Amino acid sequence: MPEANPVCERLAIVGLGLIGSSIARGARQYGLARSIVAIDRDPAVIERVQALGLADEATGEAEGVAGADLVILCVPVGAVGAVAEAMAPHLKPGAIVSDVGSVKASVVAAVSPHLPEGVHFVPAHPVAGTEYSGPDAGFSTLFSGRWCILTPPEGTDKAATARVQAFWEGLGAIVESMTPEHHDLVLAITSHVPHLIAYNIVGTAADLEAVTQSEVIKFSAGGFRDFTRIAASDPTMWRDVFLTNKDAVLEMLGRFNEDLAALARAIRWGDGDALFDLFTRTRAIRRGIVALGQETAEADFGRSRTPPEPAKDEPVSGR
Amino acid sequence: MPEANPVCERLAIVGLGLIGSSIARGARQYGLARSIVAIDRDPAVIERVQALGLADEATGEAEGVAGADLVILCVPVGAVGAVAEAMAPHLKPGAIVSDVGSVKASVVAAVSPHLPEGVHFVPAHPVAGTEYSGPDAGFSTLFSGRWCILTPPEGTDKAATARVQAFWEGLGAIVESMTPEHHDLVLAITSHVPHLIAYNIVGTAADLEAVTQSEVIKFSAGGFRDFTRIAASDPTMWRDVFLTNKDAVLEMLGRFNEDLAALARAIRWGDGDALFDLFTRTRAIRRGIVALGQETAEADFGRSRTPPEPAKDEPVSGR
């Protein structure tokens, strides 16, 4: 493979869901590993991995990590501790263990104690995903142009961190490092609380008596449908996120609630200027996200495909 | 124009923003009116309307409605009363007046008193839009496959209601009727509260001290960016929506807050089952929205375009 630039010899991916299977596809496509072993406790997933040809080997056993120089845990954050414990005895000396968890402090606390001397742990979080789950949902370009955050604990081997960075850059990601605590605070507001309020409003709408579910669905194009996308994300993954990033989520949620109470008060008392000021301020943030290539500038996310409009000089009255 | 099937002779559109200019484009493209007059108090908008060739005539004067048999008000709901008053003396007997406001009870109360005997008022609300504003943002297919809700007051002329329905069906919309009060309740949960919490979380994120705005923007792909789209909607329109649908919005917001408090409590006390149950329940609603053609089934709204994956029987190591 001429263009191949392997970052590791043997890559072990534990958990072949949306993220794990996207890593497998990307590692293959960009030649980041000489061989890939897929490990998943679910026999149905192993079957799909084999049918899709996502790895050179696929197994349900933790022993599968034997001989791997890079092991990436792609399981829900509530499960990483148990998975690390099960695979620890089989890890090769000098191996690098990483993960993709949306929470970092709790992952460091859960994984580190199980890893033998001489094995390097470099926690990572690729900030990317879709509302779909499972090995069929992944694709090789999921991480392209997205940020991947590394949170190496104090004293982590620099060479190990550099290799994990090279791996993610090989998948097209932009790598940045910060402490696990800061990561958990940043993601609480950019990802966790947004998911929580999306799940919440979809639940609120589903429970109304005065408005039928069929009305909620029919008239969802007024804004509601946008929230249903992230409210369709994997329930196990998200349950674990909220249970393991409790403090940061509750802190950010508290701020969200204070601001929402002020907005409700502005509505009740007819303070149009307060509403107008906020509604104007928020436009700038989206412009920044679009400018940074983290969002499409297409209207309505490009959902409403528009045919070419008749130009001025063409006859345009009816047709 | 052979395929043309005019629903009216002379169509007057008052307010040429996203919605008004989309109606003008659609009416042209589908031949729904023999002539179109565009009325907007902003000279810059009139200039764009002329440059884009969106209407046969364009004026800043309320007198522009003279001779029109169908007049559609496409101004913010806080302005419809004053606009109706200004144009009332110029309305032709038997003319039909309609609107596109996101709130209906307050629009009926604001417009009806100004309309002379023999002029029919058929309030309407097309549930469609994008985050962009102004005459350049519109497109003729904006309403295609979307619902348009009519809220004709008791005793409204049946023929007038039928013509407004035919007009919206001509634009590709699906028409449904309900009372203004029920409309305002349904839209409070499917559109108004979603916009309010989207504006709110974007504001909360912008105001954090511990997390920089550049971090919020970089890591927005974790979910936050979805909210920034509707939080980029027109500030004047949305200020008016909240001021004129106060009771329904505060009622639905109250329910949202109760449910959110229960979720926060589940997080604080580690009730994973409560979280998992909600996160599973919410998936069904999105499936319903996709099934009804109100949402794309494409992952991530189709924002992440995926290249074809290598098939199983092809060599897939590297490329």
Image (spheres, coloured by chain):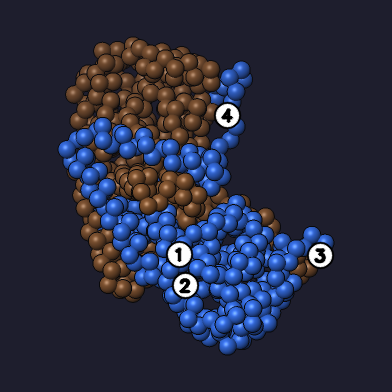
Chain colours: A brown, B blue
Q: Secondary structure at mark 2?
A: helix
Q: Chain of mark 4?
A: B
Q: How far apart are the alpha carbons under marks 3 and 2?
A: 36 Å
Residue B309, numbered label: 4
* Label 4 close to label 2 by CB (< 8 Å): no
Where residue A301 is drawn, which disc sits there? none
Q: Which residue is mark 3?
A: B1
C-alpha separation, residue under disc 2 versus residue under disc 1:
8 Å
- The quadrant of the rendering that contains the C terminus of chain B is top right
> Mark 4 Cα within 10 Å, few/some/many (few <14, many 20+)?
some
| Residue B192 seen in render | yes
Asked if B128 appears above or below A85 in the picture, the reply is below
The residue lying at 50 percent from left, 49 percent from top is: A218
Label 3 to label 4, Cα distance in Å? 47 Å
Locate residue B199: give its quadrant: bottom left
Q: Position of residue A302 (x, y in %)?
A: 56, 51
Q: Residues within 10 Å of mark 2 (few under 14, many from 20)?
A: many
Q: Do the numbered discs 2 and 1 sit on residues whose CB atoms are within 8 Å?
A: yes
Q: Amino acid at mark 3?
A: Met
Same chain for the residues at labels 1 and 3, yes or no?
yes
N-term-proximal mark, 3 vs 2 = 3
How far across and how far down the image is residue B123, in percent? 53, 68
Between the C-alphas of marks 1 and 4, the distance is: 50 Å
Residue that mark 2 sits on: B108
In the displayed structure, does residue A132 sit left or right of residue B247?
right
Dot 4 amino acid type: Glu
Q: Secondary structure at mark 4?
A: loop
